[in-house]
Amino acid sequence: MANKIPIKHRLKELRIEAGLSQKKLGILAGIDEFSASPRVNQYETGKHVPDFIMLKSFAKVLKVPTCYFYAENDDLANLIKLYGNFTPDQKKQLTNKIRSINAKK
């Protein structure tokens, strides 16, 4: 994803995956229904960048950790997305496994 603003691309990809229109996503994230579609469009085109609170709202609606939007690397973004769906026990197991792998370097 070199030379691209990750937020705009990740937001659009998730919205499409979720089967939501720009307007519906905006409304679910707390944007007024009359400005929801134009605002989400501006975020997806990179004309404006949503603030952290707005990204948290989008993340909640789209069921991903907020940091997913900031990951510059696609592989890391995908790991973050998967991690967000894990149970607390699965997260602990994964963290322990990564520590184990890292210790073997």
Image: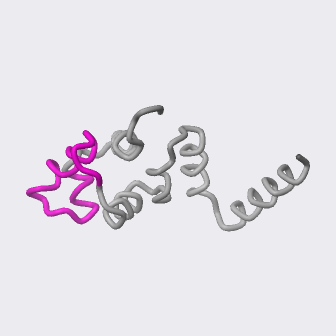
Q: Residue 51 appears at what percent x and percent y?
A: 31, 61
Q: Residue 78 appears at what percent x and percent y?
A: 56, 43
Q: Residue 93 appears at what percent x and percent y?
A: 77, 60
Q: Is residue 48 magenta?
A: yes
Looking at this view, name the residue that lies furthest to the front: 3
Q: In this rendering, would 21 be left or right of 32? A: right
**Residue at 61 percent of width and 54 percent of height:** 83
Is 16 drawn above or below residue 80 in the view shown?
above
Q: In this rendering, would 87 be left or right of 62? A: right
Q: Residue 92 appears at what percent x and percent y?
A: 74, 65
Q: How many marks?
A: 0
**Residue at 42 percent of width and 33 percent of height:** 3
Looking at this view, name the residue that lies furthest to the right: 104
**Residue at 28 percent of width and 62 percent of height:** 29
- The residues colored magenta run 24-49
Q: In this rendering, would 27 be left or right of 65? A: left
Nearest the eye: 82 or 5? 5
**Residue at 47 percent of width and 33 percent of height:** 1
Q: How is the image coloured?
A: one colour
Q: Quadrant of residue 88?
A: bottom right
Is 3 drawn above or below residue 22 in the view shown?
above
Q: In this rendering, would 83 be left or right of 33? A: right
Q: Is residue 61 magenta?
A: no
Looking at this view, name the residue that lies furthest to the top: 2
Q: Quadrant of residue 45?
A: top left
